[in-house]
């Protein structure tokens, strides 16, 4: 369980702290306290700090405090604490309060009577305790998501002791950043790595803030390059959640470009016994969200149609063999830098075999479309007029698109 700005006000002996602005950011996670002794903080913070400003070593007039608010927002600090009293900073200017509120940056006033050592000690102790509880909770949550029936009873007891709600209905969401190759192409490897880390931190903060509003008890888990969120089930129309997620995703993807955040949702489950299945479903839906452009980076397992049946086949070799048997000849012939046969086949299926519409979708002449389809039929050794063959071919295309070994290539 992380220590948030909201938790700071409940710590012993810190009841004289006052939140002056930034209520929208009170669920931000505090990583450590930092006393700012320089005129600027931009070069000295990495994100998540609770920054303290005293005015002892530098003049903290209105322009400087406004500058600190802007820098704190840009560097994603958890909050800014300004000490006020008869000396140094007598009061927080109204313009500083207004700007912090606009940015959603928690701005806290600390009276000089409250000694800094008392505040930093309380925050430091709370951080250590929160980290210990957090590690235990994360460990138990990960084990519960693995769904090992042998240890489930013991894990449930541990979860109850740690205050993890396991009886409530949950829907599991898995998120992943896509497009690191494009990032390297644009910035080069060193700059791309910095941008990737910054984007990952942005996603972590955004998901944690959203989860904190929905359910402050459960943390966001991170496994490899994926984030896992256990959402409380909603009783309203599920389409409302999907609409919200689509809007939330579009908003954050505007600032993540050329990276793209994709989301997969599992089916709602009734209790902890469904978490493992829900995680598997969410990961399958995530693959579909990444693979199909029309999904716009968001897919629910319940929307996957026939792909949901394929998700039940956990032996990947069976699926790969099916693809090669039905589509292998076309894939082997389409290995050039500008593949055309697979995009042609996909376009033809998308418009139910309408040559004119398929040609228009690909931006080619109808005769070109006909020529490509004839070549595909020759490679497959059969025509496209057999309904059973068309069904197998369509399923092979779907499986190929969600294959973990497939490389996204040009579809022109």
Image (cartoon, rainbow, N blue to C red):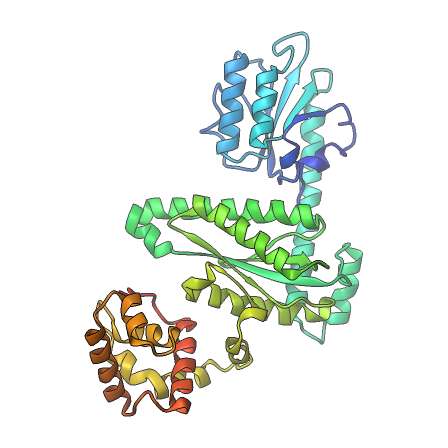
Q: How many marks?
A: 0
Q: Is residue 81 above or below residue 151?
A: above
Q: Quadrant of residue 228?
A: bottom right
Hey, which quadrant is residue 108 in on the image?
top right
Nearer-the-camera pick, 268 or 343:
343
Q: Does 31 sit left or right of 169 as displayed?
A: left
Residue 398 occupies which quadrant of the picture?
bottom left
Q: Residue 110: x percent and y percent? A: 69, 21
In the image, residue 20 sits, relative to residue 281, either above or below, namely above
Side of 320 relative to 230 (left or right)? left
Is 259 drawn above or below residue 361 in the view shown?
above
- Residue 394: % across, % down: 40, 81
Q: Is residue 55 above or below residue 122?
A: above
Residue at x 48% of width, y 18% of height: 39
| Residue under the image location 78 percent in, 27 percent down | 13
Q: Residue at x 76, y 55 (%)?
A: 162
* Most distant residue in the top direction: 86
Q: Is residue 1 visible?
A: no
Which quadrant: the C terminus? bottom left
Q: Residue 232's x, y, as percent?
A: 70, 57
- In the shown orientation, is residue 206 left or right of residue 276? left
Residue 57 image point, x, y percent: 54, 14
Q: Is residue 179 visible in this depiction of the protein?
A: yes
């Amino acid at each position: 369980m992380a220590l948030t700005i909201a938790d700071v006000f409940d710590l012993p002996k810190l009841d004289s702290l006052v939140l002056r602005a930034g209520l929208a950011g009170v669920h931000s996670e505090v990583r450590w306290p930092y006393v700012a002794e320089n005129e600027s903080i931009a070069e000295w913070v990495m994100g998540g700090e609770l920054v303290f400003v005293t005015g002892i070593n530098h003049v903290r007039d209105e322009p400087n405090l406004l500058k600190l608010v802007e820098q704190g927002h840009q560097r994603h600090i958890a909050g800014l604490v300004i000490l006020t009293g008869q000396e140094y900073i007598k009061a927080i200017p109204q313009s500083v309060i207004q700007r912090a509120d606009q940015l959603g940056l928690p701005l806290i006033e600390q009276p000089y009577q409250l000694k800094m050592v008392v505040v930093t000690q309380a925050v430091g102790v709370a951080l250590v305790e929160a980290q210990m509880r957090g590690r235990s909770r994360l460990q138990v949550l990960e084990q519960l998501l693995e769904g090992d029936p042998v240890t489930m009873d013991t894990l449930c007891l541990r979860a109850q002791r740690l205050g993890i709600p396991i009886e409530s209905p949950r829907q599991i969401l898995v998120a992943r950043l896509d497009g690191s190759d494009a990032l390297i192409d644009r910035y080069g490897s060193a700059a791309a790595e910095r941008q990737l880390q910054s984007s990952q931190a942005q996603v972590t903060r955004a998901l944690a803030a959203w989860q904190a509003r929905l359910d402050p008890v459960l943390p966001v888990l991170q496994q490899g390059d994926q984030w896992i969120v256990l959402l409380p089930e909603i009783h309203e129309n599920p389409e409302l959640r999907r609409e919200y997620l689509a809007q939330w995703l579009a908003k954050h993807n505007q600032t993540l470009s050329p990276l793209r955040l994709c989301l997969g949702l599992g089916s709602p489950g009734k209790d902890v016994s469904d978490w493992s299945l829900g995680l598997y479903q969410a990961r399958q839906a995530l693959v579909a969200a990444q693979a199909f452009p029309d999904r716009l980076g968001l897919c629910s397992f319940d929307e996957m149609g026939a792909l949901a049946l394929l998700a039940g086949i956990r032996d990947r070799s069976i699926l790969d063999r099916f693809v090669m048997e039905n589509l292998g000849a076309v894939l082997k012939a389409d290995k050039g830098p500008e593949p055309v046969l697979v995009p042609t086949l996909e376009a033809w299926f998308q418009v139910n075999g309408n040559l004119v519409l398929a040609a228009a979708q690909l931006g080619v002449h109808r005769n070109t479309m006909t020529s490509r389809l004839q070549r595909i039929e020759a490679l497959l050794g059969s025509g496209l007029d057999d309904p059973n063959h068309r069904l197998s071919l369509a399923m092979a295309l779907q499986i190929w698109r969600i294959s973990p070994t497939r490389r996204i290539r040009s579809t022109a």
